[in-house]
Image: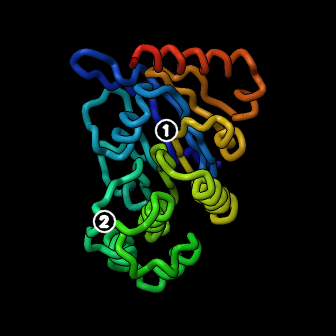
Amino acid sequence: MLNIVEIEHLTVKYPDVKALDDVSFTVKEGDFLGIIGPNGAGKSTLFASMLGLNTKYDGSIKFFGQDIRKSKDYLKEIGYVPQKPIFEKNFPATVNDIVRMSLRKEANEKKIDEILQQLWIHELSNRRIGELSGGQQQRVFIAKALVNNPKILILDEPVTGIDQQSIDLFYSILKELNSKQKITIIWSSHDLDAVNQLANHVACLNRTLFFHGESDEFFENDELVKQYSEASMQEHMHHH
């Protein structure tokens, strides 16, 4: 399998802190990578760097063998789902409008219909985005990310503040996208059980990378899981 993402010695410094310190890992085609780590571990900084939104870093990031500093072509192959966006109830855009926003010219309307059906939100296509529940809104953002047939889907803690039923549906959709449509998924989450069930690889991040490998190897190692939990707990205490 090809390495479609290669990150080498990625370091991001802010004036008072290193957000990421010498992080290296690869993602192969068809992988489902769960990125776990406490709040403040650098997950959002990692994604911002991968998506070209943060350009002040040391080290290198390659997609499809090409350094992202040299070409932005890789972005056409990526669908990105951010943490939950918030809308005013009367925000005028409909579900259809939101998904169409990211549709590139060569793609077509039929594709919008297909994606909305696949994500069980077809009947909501003319509803205003602000009228939908958190879970429904999140599926609209997945639709927006998928409408151009990306090879990679990047999701940044996408189920924050969503009810359990919507979360379960969301996870089953991700599983299907990865197993049936062979979309490579890179997903950050605090839900260790879900990562254990869905991801075939895990990257454990706390500014540095203290584990990257197969998820079985991580979850079957009590010592690693304990280390992770303690790091999360310390970070939590530190923030309070």
Residue highlighted by disc 2:
89
Residue highlighted by disc 1:
6
Which amino acid does the dot numbered 2 rest on? Answer: Lys
Residue that extends furthest to the left in the rendered view of this protein: 15
Residue that extends furthest to the bottom in the rendered view of this protein: 110
Name the spot of residue 32 as percent of width and height, x first: 62, 47
The residue depicted at 44 percent of the width and 28 percent of the height is 39
In this view, the residue in front, 88 or 66, is 88
In this view, the residue in front, 124 or 18, is 124
Q: Kindly tell me whether residue 178 is visible in this rendering.
A: no
User: Relative to residue 104, is residue 212 drawn left or right?
Assistant: right
Which amino acid does the dot numbered 1 rest on? Answer: Glu
The residue depicted at 35 percent of the width and 74 percent of the height is 128
Q: SS class of the residue under badge 2?
A: loop
User: Relative to residue 195, is residue 19 drawn left or right?
Assistant: left
**Residue 28 occupies which quadrant of the picture?**
top right
The residue depicted at 29 percent of the width and 21 percent of the height is 13
Q: Quadrant of the C terminus?
A: top left
- Which mark identifies residue 85? none
